[in-house]
Image (tube, rainbow, N blue to C red):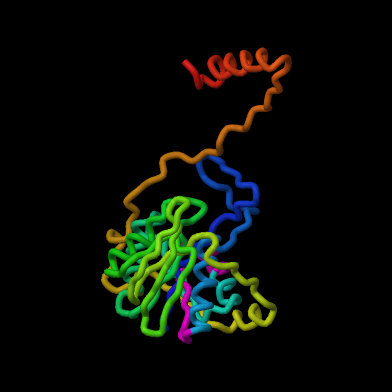
Amino acid sequence: MNIYVLLKQTFDTEEKVAVHEGEIVEEGAKFVINPYDEYAVEEALRISERHGGKVTVVSVGPERYAEALRTALAMGADEAVLITDSRIGADEYAVAEALAAFLSGRNPELVLGGNFSVDNGAGQVAVRLAQRLGLPHIAAVIKLDIAEDGKTVAHRDAEGDVEIVETALPALITAQQGLNEPRYPSLPGIMKAKKKPLQRLTLDDLEGLTAEAVSARTERTALFLPPPRKAGKRLTGEPADQAQQLVRLLREEAKALQ
């Protein structure tokens, strides 16, 4: 089976993120595979182990994404491709256009990705890519079964409920938390990853694309951290007094009551 996994590198959300003049400070920051993409990598490896085939991880982004791709190779992916070019915009539209140009003609039987990225949280790339490639798309999948004949049954998270969706391959599916438990790269896997192919492409390698076609269609106008949390207040006195204090605080300070 010819499986492609869409992969993005993001900040480690467990680390402190600093913002200076509307930009995230990358110096000293820790980067990881987007957690939802990590579920996609693991699922691709499990499917490959059951049905055979090749797993290729693909990223569109700066050179530092190569580190995340190497991690995926160490997990067990067969090949990696990094599409990096300053002429390619960084928004979801541009990334999807670049991925569509790369995947067109490669006949993927299955494309996997994360439900969304933890940095932007837009969840648009997979939807746009599926439309561009003419593939059925199932989002937020928490269980996936693929039969030998290509029939696919996906259980997807639906706001606390579960929907069961059937489709046939080829298809594009995005992973939700709970789909699996990603494996850690083993030492032999890390050593093998150094010899696995990691291909670097630019805009010039994507047939039929121009710089205008992959220019960003959206612009971030501001980025800032949430205000620091204020210290909590302890209400004292009898229950009736506490209720009066709470109502006053909600009305005068929180402005939650009229």
Identify the residue at image location x=60%, y=76%. 74
Is 59 situated left or right of 38 in this image? Answer: left
Q: Position of residue 219 (x, y in %)?
A: 37, 46
Residue stretch in magenta: 51-68
Q: Tell which of 10 and 177 is nearer to you.
A: 177
Q: Is residue 62 visible?
A: no
Q: Is residue 15 visible?
A: yes
Is 186 situated left or right of 6 in this image? Answer: right
Q: Position of residue 83 (x, y in %)?
A: 43, 69
Q: Position of residue 238 (x, y in %)?
A: 71, 15
| In the rendered image, the vertical position of residue 94 relative to residue 235, given as above or below | below
Q: Tell which of 237 and 218 is nearer to you.
A: 237
Q: In the rendered image, which quarter is residue 12 located in? A: bottom right
In the current view of this chain or complex, which residue is farthest to the bottom?
52
Q: Quadrant of the N terminus?
A: bottom left
Identify the residue at image location x=41%, y=84%. 148
